[in-house]
Image (cartoon, rainbow, N blue to C red):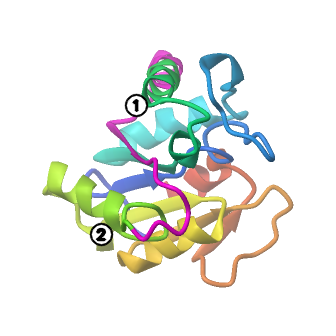
Amino acid sequence: MNWNIDQSWTLFLDRDGVINKRLMGDYVKSVAEFELLDGVAEALCVAAQTFGRIVVVTNQQGIGKGIMTERNLFDIHTYATELINEAGGRIDRYYFAPELAGSGEGFRKPEAGMGLQAKQDFPEIDFKKSVMIGDSDSDIQFGKNLGMKTVFVSQNMENHESADITVSSLYEGIKQLV
């Protein structure tokens, strides 16, 4: 992929299934349940040297369901940041949508709310110079809705019809982008 990515670009990342192990049928509710996927720390180290901003956009309806609290989520993100920083990577900001699917509040992916909030916080973000890496239809649609390039993470390499590229992991995605 030759998108000429440099410090003027922004990397948007989904969390569960891209950064950390997804718990099928459940939610990562505590630090004890959070496990970085192989190669993530290394990938974010490379990304930190390439992208001007790295943000996580994550749907967290476990909060809306009362299964976990915002404090639990804050603790998980603090822990993740520590692991990533130790490896030389970084995440500049986390955005999360606690509402339930179908709430119509506009923040939950694939709606644009988290991206628009990121643009408000980082006015230099240009969505045409942004990449969304995710493992679900809503992640890819979120990126497309905002005019981003999109990378679909599929462990079995099943192509996503709307994504610009498909990779097996965040590590493979970053390798292709830089």
Q: Amino acid at mark 1?
A: Arg
- Which percent across, then down, holds residue 44? 50, 37
User: What crowding class fits label 1: few (fewer than 14 Cα within 10 Å), some (14-19), or many (20 or more)?
Assistant: many
Whether residue 65 can be seen here: yes
Q: Is residue 162 magenta?
A: no
Question: What is the spatial separation of the Cα atoms under label 1 and label 2, in whole angstroms?
Answer: 20 Å
- Identify the disc placed on residue 90: 1
Q: Is residue 82 or residue 107 the one in the foreground? A: 107
Q: Secondary structure at mark 1?
A: loop
Q: Compared with residue 83, is residue 67 higher up or lower down, i.e. above or below?
A: below
Q: For residue 81, what is the image quadrant?
A: top left
- Which percent across, then down, holds residue 6? 32, 55
Part of the protein shown in magenta = 80-104
Please identify the residue farthest to the right as the structure is shown: 156
| Residue at 15% in and 57% down | 124
Q: For residue 35, what is the image quadrant?
A: top right
User: Are the residues tagged 1 and 2 within 8 Å (C-beta)?
Assistant: no
| Residue at 53% in and 19% down | 83
- Identify the disc placed on residue 127: 2
Q: Compared with residue 14, is residue 149 higher up or lower down, i.e. above or below?
A: below
- Which percent across, then down, holds residue 138? 57, 69
